[in-house]
Amino acid sequence: MRALFIGGTGTISMAIVERLAKDPLWEVWVLNRGLRRAALPEGVHQIVADVKNEAETARKLKDMTFDTVCEFIGFTREDVERDYRLFAGRTRQYIYTSSASAYNKPAASYRITEGTTLANPYWQYSRDKIACEDFLMDKYRTEGFPVTIVRPSHTYDERHIPLGMHGKNGAWQVVKRMLDGKPVIIHGDGSSLWTLTFNTDFAVGYTGLMGNRHAIGEAFQITGDETLTWDQIYATIADALGVELKAVHVSSEFLAAAGEKYGYDFRGNLIGDKAVSVVFDNSKLKALVPEMTTRVPFSRGVRIALAYILSHPEECQKADPEFDAWCDRVIAAQATALTLV
């Protein structure tokens, strides 16, 4: 069987490519700009093209056909409309990577299933994902376009520490605050529920849907089974670092307003996503992929990530003095406000 990954070198997709490259039943291709060619596993074929250049991509695809086309960098309706033109009649399955942030915020129930309504008034990113899903499902219903939709939640790998919020240079500045003994902001009161999934676990669920006819015309959320509060998440990071967590809880609404003028989209990231308690019911996925389970709990995954990040300073330790100073101002502002009541 032949699979094509559009992208293929990101946090989620690389783990899937690596898993599939070990499977003798699959011939693996990636279509991207070739910027991380050296990271690809041995035996993976590459088509170097910018998929946004539709004419160039069509020319390089020639008359190739695929059993599964896997889209990881489709963020707008225009992206999936292009894919439809490129791959209609050329693949037996098209898997679109949407987002669990597309679910209604807040949903009627904290327990999320694939039947939970899709609506997110707080985050354009999520609304664009919903628009992509709507287009693709319409093509399935009216023309039989063989789409499968997957909805990841918060998926991470060895290069990333999952946090509720961080600055423009990633998570390192928050980790450094912990190492330096400085207070760290946790949104809300830290008690809302969240799910974190290591990318190799995600890959098990995803590859189990590839080539599976029961997945055509269906949507599946792919997450781990472990649910943690945000206080537990930050405490686990501090434990792995061997430091004391000095948590300061700040309301998500205040963080969204305070971050707006600095270009931080905490309205989308928090109020439209991470500030809302969610627990995912993965029974639909497990009915097709019974081997899907949490093999890398967060207590282990965070240690894998920290080991990599601490040993690769040039790659992973990007200072963010602007965000560091912003955190200090927010913490000081809240402390000052408390003296006035």
Image (cartoon, rainbow, N blue to C red):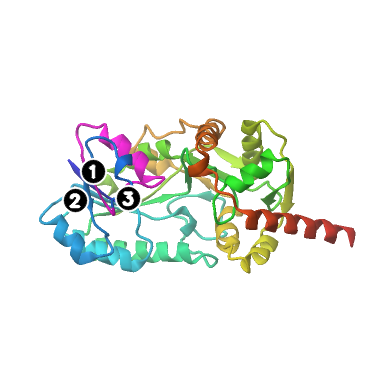
List the residue tagged with mark 1: 211
Depth check: give the residue in front, 277 or 4.
Answer: 4
Q: Residues within 10 Å of mark 1 (few under 14, many from 20)?
A: some
Q: Residues within 10 Å of mark 2 (few under 14, many from 20)?
A: some
Mark 3 → mark 2, Cα distance in angstroms: 28 Å
Residue ID at (35%, 42%): 14
Mark 1 → mark 2, Cα distance in angstroms: 8 Å
Depth check: give the residue in front, 317 or 69.
Answer: 317
State yes or no: discs 1 and 2 in contact (Cβ < 8 Å): yes
In the figure, is residue 152 to the left or right of 142? Answer: right
Residue ID at (55%, 62%): 268
Depth check: give the residue in front, 45 or 149.
Answer: 45
Marked residue nearer the N-terminal end (3 or 2): 3
Residue 138 visible in rendering: no
Say which quadrant the N terminus sits in: top left
Q: Amino acid at mark 3?
A: Leu
Residue ID at (52%, 38%): 309
Residue 301 at x, y percent in the picture: 51, 34
Q: Identify the magenta region.
A: 7-33
List the residue tagged with mark 3: 35
Q: Secondary structure at mark 2?
A: loop
Q: Secondary structure at mark 1?
A: loop
Marked residue nearer the N-terminal end (1 or 3): 3
Q: Amino acid at mark 2?
A: Arg
How many numbered marks have been drawn onto this rendered protein structure? 3
